[in-house]
Amino acid sequence: MPEKQYDHHEIEPKWHEQWKESGIYRSGEPGKPKYYVLEMLPYPSGRLHMGHVRNYSIGDALARYMWMKGYDVLHPMGWDAFGLPAENAAMQRGRHPREWTWANIDEMKRQMKRMGFAYDWEREISTCEPDYYRWNQWFFLKMLERGLAYRKKALVNWCPECGTVLANEQVVDGCCWRHEKTPVEQRALEQWFLKTTAYADQLLDDMKEIEAGWPERVLTMQRNWIGRSEGAEVDFTLAGSGRTVRVFTTRVDTIYGATCVILAPEHALVEELCGAEVRAQAREMIDRRARQEAGDIKKEGLKTGLEAVNPFSGERVPVWIGNFVLTGYGTGAIMAVPAHDERDFEFCTEYGIAVRPVIRPVEGTLPEKVTVAFTGYGVVENSGEWSGLKSEDARKAMSEKARREGFGEAAVTYRLKDWGVSRQRYWGTPIPVIHCEKDGIVPVPENELPVLLPMDVSITGQGRSPLADSEEFMNVKCPRCGGAARRESDTMDTFVDSSWYFYRYCDPNNAEAPFAPEKAAKWFPIDQYIGGVTHAILHLIYSRFWTKVMRDLGLIQNSEPARNLFTQGMVLGEDGTAMSKSKGNIVDPEEMVAKYGADTCRLFVLFAAPPEKDMPWNEQSVGGQRRFLERVYRFFTRSLDRRGAGAGDAEAERQARRKLHQTIHKITGDFDSRWHFNTSIAALMELVNELYAREAGLGGEALGEVLPALALMLAPFAPYLAEQMWEELGRTGPVFKQAWPSYDEALAAEDSIEIPLQVNGKLRGRLHVAAGTAKETLEKMALEDAKLRPYLEGKTVVRVVVVPDKLVNIVVK
């Protein structure tokens, strides 16, 4: 066959049409081990961007490889379809959110298919459809039954631009996560919460199940967000009123050094006991704090005029209000011990409050004047009967006294707060409760689910939920008394939708349950989950919480949703900054596919950087990937007819086969361990270079081994070209359903290898020896090496560390 030129305009549309409706990516092959690989589902914004392409190319390469390794692969896709952008589009373009959303889904799905991503579209879900969100409502009712869903008036984060409440995790640097320059306000509203704190210890303890497969960075972020602290709660009595204020402290051993009590500005006692002027100033303090990131808040204090009695010492200390004290952590009140806490020291020196040391270092004394807080453990002093005890012993004894005498107890508190899920917007899951004057809050009966979103609403983006203005939606009969009642007008946070969606993929058409437990049991936990690190304390905590709730409902057996998590890096513009419309550095995948082909785009995003690193866009390098595919196809097509030729040059064939088996070994190792697809593709390039160099000497038998293996190794990365090559080889069946090529260790072995020579861990020379050279021989050659002699003369060799085929390190002194 004469050499053919690679034309993606011819090859890719041909296979795109054949794959489009064929069902070749369907999962459920009996007798094979399961493998569930999943990329986080996207919001249907309208078009794919290069970040999508990179994320999905990583998952797609893995899915195709696992098919070739003999697994029954589940690789689905769906749409995180509720959310604010659809409402904003409705206001800006005059289109209903549902119409806008589904137009975007259709476009993005078309683009995904054109990219050749191997999704089982028969399992597709969209979270804005009633057959999905009815189960959001069902889960909510189950949590309500178990006390895990509740309603209370609370200060909440309010984005004036979104016109809705934000969860704590959605406030970034004091601003809305969607509107990065819009300061968040604090408002007191009746809100629905899910009790994530009920699972705080499990969220921490169960990390042992995923430590081996999740990035430590993500686990650390979650540990810090959950923020478990062990300490004690102690009651200070307010002088003159008999009321008590309970404080939480992790260092009860320092309580004799407490020189004031500080309340959060929203603490109930501020409203109950403080004067009008102090209350007004406290409310202003709350608003200022809402516009600042917690770590950057300038500490503000407000004197209340109240005094509290220390239950251990009997001393009266002033009560202050501080903007850095939070109601959601501990009790919303602290005792300030400025000599032993840096934050307290800063606050008390600013406001002239006494500083009294009561803990000294084990080998030191108390300072006459405190210039810096001593925050370590030591020996307790000036603390009554506990003086002379070590801090650890004093903590236990003092906590026990508080418990025994009824003014406190040992306690654990968390930084994690319950998840506020109420949103004052339209395009979300209606909360399935009814408000009745007689019966209060009444759950919607399960047989009346789903509570459907009305289609005829007016979306203004102003303040309250648009549902509140739909009389047909709001006015209902109470399920208990039959009297007039009103529906809940808030909708659920859209992170509810994405907290359990991956289970629905297992049974997407089930009309009787969220999914059949036995179907979820087949696929869970997810073997490989792929997405951005930005979801570490949003989606990834919520989904872990939801999994534990479903386990306790008896739906599943697993406690964690995903065994392994991979967080890919971002795609940056050519200027090295994140791609954005405002910077004008967006690259449209559609344009790149038209110009270079989908295979080239996929190769580039996998080759340009290790997948966990940020990847700068470089169109010149994209052209390099295109030229590589052109070289592959030219060699392949002109070699096809030579498969029937006789034997070639023995040495050329030996070298080509060695490089082939080394490449198979390399790519197999990359898939099975570190996922450095950039080095896998580099290895393919080296193989093609070797084949070009040895081409004249390759006979029919060698080509009969090389050409199929080349097509198979390309299949995870460049599926269109690999499929074309497979067909031209005369083979049948999708190339990604063929067995992954195996390698022969003996054939892959180098004739000679390079051994680094080190002295005290520093590289000082190299040996070139036959692979498998004995340990004793390597040691002898290293000690006699001329380049090492200057580093050994006059010194004593302590030991020689030899790692065969790897290195020799001579330790001297």
Image (cartoon, grey):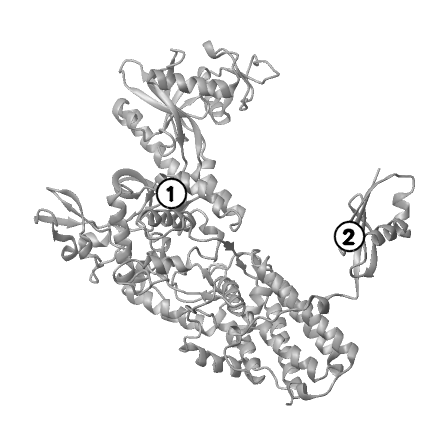
The residue where tag 1 is placed is 168
Q: Is residue 499 visible?
A: yes
Task: Please tell me how crowded label 2 is: few (under 14), some (14-19), or many (20+) other residues with Cα within 10 Å.
Answer: some
Taking 646 as reference, is 476 above or below it? above
The mark total stands at 2
Question: Could you tell me how far apart the alpha carbons at marks 1 and 2 are, in whole angstroms?
Answer: 52 Å
Q: Position of residue 587 (x, y in %)?
A: 51, 66
Comparing labels 1 and 2, the label whose residue is closer to the camera: 2
Taking 471 as reference, is 655 above or below it? below
Q: Is residue 89 left or right of residue 766?
A: left
Disc on res. 554: none
The residue where tag 2 is placed is 807
Residue lying at the far bottom of the rendered structure: 1
Q: Position of residue 269 (x, y in %)?
A: 29, 25
Quarter holding the N terminus is bottom right
First along the sequence among labels 1 and 2:
1
Disc 1 marks a residue whose amino acid type is: Asn
Identity of the residue drawn at 41% across and 38% down: 201
Identity of the residue drawn at 92% across and 39% down: 794
Considering depth in this image, is 112 or 641 the residue closer to the camera?
Answer: 641
Q: Kindly check if marks 1 and 2 are in contact, taking CB atoms under 8 A apart as contact.
A: no
Considering depth in this image, is 462 or 523 the residue closer to the camera?
Answer: 523
Q: Position of residue 210 (x, y in %)?
A: 49, 48
Identity of the residue drawn at 26% across and 61% down: 130
